[in-house]
Image (spheres, helix red, strand yellow):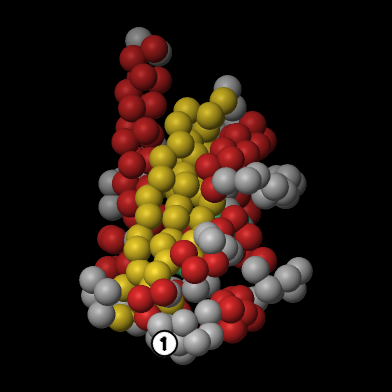
Amino acid sequence: MQVVISTRNKNKLQEISRILGTEGIETVGVEMFPGAPEIEEDGRTFAENAAKKALTIARFTKRLTLADDSGLEVEALAGAPGVYSARYSGENATYETNNQKLLAELAGLPPERRTARFICSVAVADPGGVIGIVEGEYPGRIIEEPRGSNGFGYDPVFFSPEYGKTLAEMDPKVKNRISHRARAFQKAKELVRKYQKEIRGSSR
Ligand code: ITT
């Protein structure tokens, strides 16, 4: 079974391929389909953006497609950066400038006021429509200085109390087992399985 992953983010594609690969679901990135449309992420929620990304690419590729929209919600910032996580520090944002902005916004706040969570919404769609949307989250807090070099995005400033380290200090294998993305894609796997069964059933 092959599914298309509607992302242009190589780090995300790698994590997703590893998560789904353990169940024998083969992934192919949207980059393999020349001319695939760029999708404007203009939804108000992660779920809306994930659904738009999955459906647009399912229609273009005519294949079962999974898309995730993910980001960081910081409690003291009323849920920001949220759906703007990728471009938090502006048009030319990099992971580093986003982390710098986040640390500046939280400067002076004590650890107990720096709680945050990563959220990941995954939508599954075929050319006929969206089949389902699931969500996973991972709780933690923002530390004062980046630590570690694994992962991507906000990983170096996101501390997991459960493991006593940042996600960037964590073995990627562990992150791929416990993260918001892992949790959401575990649920998405079930949707893919159900879809496979129904397709097989209806072609008999
Ligand atoms: P696509 O839209 O092509 O999938 P993207 O990087 O724009 O790629 P998102 O819209 O989902 O992806 O933005 C998610 C941003 O949230 C991402 O750029 C990171 O800054 C942050 N993020 C998401 N998951 C993360 C993770 O596991 N670790 C660290 N940061 C993460």
- Which of the 4 image quarters holds residue 96? bottom right
Q: Nearer the viewer, residue 108 or 101?
A: 108
| The N terminus: image quadrant | top left
- Does residue 140 appear left or right of residue 50 in this picture? left
Q: Is residue 62 above or below residue 21?
A: above
| The C terminus: image quadrant | top left
Three-letter residue code for mark 1: Arg
Q: Residue at x 67, y 66 (%)?
A: 87
Q: Decide if residue 168 is in sight here.
A: no
| Count of marks, rendered view | 1
Q: Residue at x 46, y 82 (%)?
A: 109
Q: Nearer the viewer, residue 203 or 109?
A: 109
Which of the four quarters of the rendered structure image does ligand 1 lie in?
bottom right
Q: Name the secondary structure under disc 1.
A: loop
- Does residue 42 appear left or right of residue 15 in this picture? right
Q: Decide if residue 47 is in sight here.
A: yes
Q: Where in the figure is residue 139, as x and y percent of width and height?
A: 35, 63
Q: Where in the figure is residue 197, as x and y percent of width and height?
A: 32, 23
Q: Nearer the viewer, residue 9 or 116?
A: 116
Disc 1 residue lies near ligand 1 with CB under 8 A: no
- Which of the 4 image quarters holds residue 161? bottom left
Q: Mark 1 sits on what residue?
A: 147
Q: Nearer the viewer, residue 195 or 154?
A: 154
Q: Residue at x 59, y 55 (%)?
A: 83
Q: Is residue 150 above or below residue 55?
A: below
Q: Where in the figure is residue 184, as x and y percent of width and height?
A: 38, 48
